[in-house]
Amino acid sequence: MASPDYYKSHSSPRVPMLLVLFFLVINITPSLAQDTQQLIDHICRQMEEFGFCSQTFKENLKSPNADIVALTQITIERATDNATKTHDFIRQVLDNTNDPALKNALRECENGYRVVMESFDSAALSFFQKDYDSVQRYETVTPRAEASCEDSLSTPPNTQNPLTNKNRQMRILIAMALVSLHDLMATQHN
């Protein structure tokens, strides 16, 4: 039979398993949330307005531990919603304006935003099928479509632009979608 001193020197400390799991969960969870914040920061540092980008993600996170797939989904959803609301706004302004130059510019915007809207609708369908190459094809036409609206409103004789803020937001959302998709596709090829 072994002496009591043998058990003292060879026994391992008894820490309840529940306590160990508790500390593991506490220590793992912040690093996951930190990873999400790093992804958001990485995307948003590439935008013309960091604050708008970061706020968009924070307001739409479904979990503090979102990965690049979840962040990409947010950008597609926000871009689709923004394009639809802006398209509706353009139609409303078109119905209420008598200025021929503004009407022509708004028609160009209506067409441009229709392209953006339809492209992001198609991108969303492809995204949920995990067909990221198709998502990229649909998204890459959107910057030019949005820019056609901005160009038409800034061309003389137009002196007013009722879409300045809406175009800025759309431009940032498009860039967020493209950057997050690029990052997502890079992880798929690794």
Image (cartoon, rainbow, N blue to C red):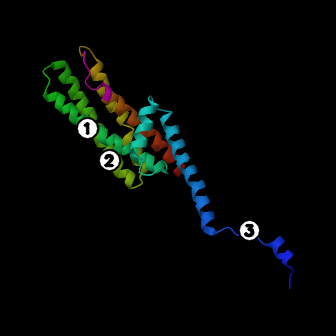
Specify the farthest residue to the front: 4
Kindly identify the residue that appears in the image at 52 percent across and 51 percent down: 188
Considering every residue shown, the one lying at the far bottom of the view is 1
**Separation of disc 3 and disc 1 at Cα?**
62 Å
| Residue of label 2 | 122
Q: Is residue 82 left or right of residue 35?
A: left
Work out whether residue 151 or residue 175 is closer to the camera in this orientation and state it.
175
Q: Amino acid at mark 3?
A: Pro
Residue located beneath label 3 in the image? 13
In this orientation, which residue lies closer to the viewer: 42 or 190? 42
Drawn side of residue 126 relative to residue 88, left or right: right
Q: Is residue 119 above or below residue 52?
A: below
The residue sitting at 60% across, 67% down in the picture is 18
- Which residues fall within the magenta stretch? 159-165
Q: Position of residue 59 (x, y in %)?
A: 39, 43
Tell me the amino acid under the disc marked 2: Ser
- Mark number, residue 85: 1
Give neighbour class at mark 3: few <14, some 14-19, many 20+ (Cα, 10 Å): few
| Image spot of residue 45 (x, y percent) | 51, 33
Question: Which of the two discs, 3 and 1, sits closer to the camera?
Answer: 3
The residue drawn where x is 23% and y is 32% is: 110
